[in-house]
Image (cartoon, grey):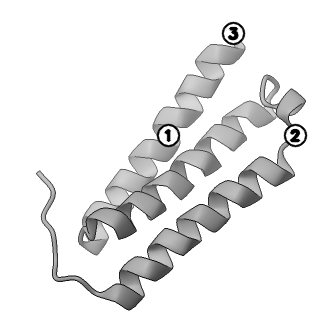
Amino acid sequence: MIDRQERNVRRDGILFLLGVAGIVLVEVVVPSDGVRSVWGAIHGFLLGCSLGIMISGIFRVRSKQALYSTLALGVGLMLGSVIDIF
């Protein structure tokens, strides 16, 4: 269950923009042909963490929940990338 907090435009906006910037940075730094190599796991982790930060800003979750969801998305996408490599 998501425990929402009051809307804080500055905090939520910064989290959202930080997440979008992270996604753009990950997609620019890691070339598309390198996703199926060892860098694929790092790419998946960073992409998942960026998505977690962005979603935390959208759903205005508390800090502890934001940390857990960010790490869970990062690890989940990393494992998905590793499975895709094999």
Task: State the residue at coordinates (40%, 45%).
Answer: 72
Q: Which residue is drawn at the image coordinates 84% and 52% (left, top)?
A: 29
**Residue type beneath disc 1:** Val
Q: Estimate the spatial distance between the alpha carbons at disc 1 and disc 2, rounded to whole Å.
A: 21 Å
Look at discs 1 and 2 and give the one toward the viewer. Answer: 2
Q: Is 59 placed above or below 12 here?
A: above
Give the spatial CA distance, label 3 vs label 2. 19 Å
Q: Position of residue 22 (x, y in %)?
A: 65, 62
User: Which of marks 1 and 3 precedes in the sequence?
Assistant: 1
In-image side of 42 versus 74 (left or right): right
Q: Badge 2 is on which residue?
A: 31
Residue 84 lies, in percent from the top left, at: 64, 16
- Numbered marks: total: 3
| Helix, strand or loop status at disc 1 | helix
Residue under the image location 49 percent in, 40 percent down? 75
In the rendered image, the vertical position of residue 51 relative to residue 36, given as above or below: below
Residue at 15% over, 57% down? 2
- Mark 2 secondary-structure assignment: loop
Quarter occupied by the C terminus: top right
For mark 2, does the 10 Å Cα neighbourhood hold few (<14), some (14 to 19), or many (20 or more) residues?
few
- Label 3, secondary structure: give it: loop
Amino acid identity at mark 2: Pro
On the picture, is 84 further left or further right than 19? right
Residue located beneath label 3 in the image = 86
Q: Residues within 10 Å of mark 1 (few under 14, many from 20)?
A: many
Residue receiving disc 1: 75
Residue 3, picture quadrant: bottom left
Residue type at mark 3 is Phe
The tag earlier along the polypeptide, 3 or 2, is 2
State whether residue 9 is above or below residue 17: below
Verify CB contact (< 8 Å) between mark 3 and mark 1.
no
Q: Are marks 3 and 2 in contact (CB under 8 Å)?
A: no
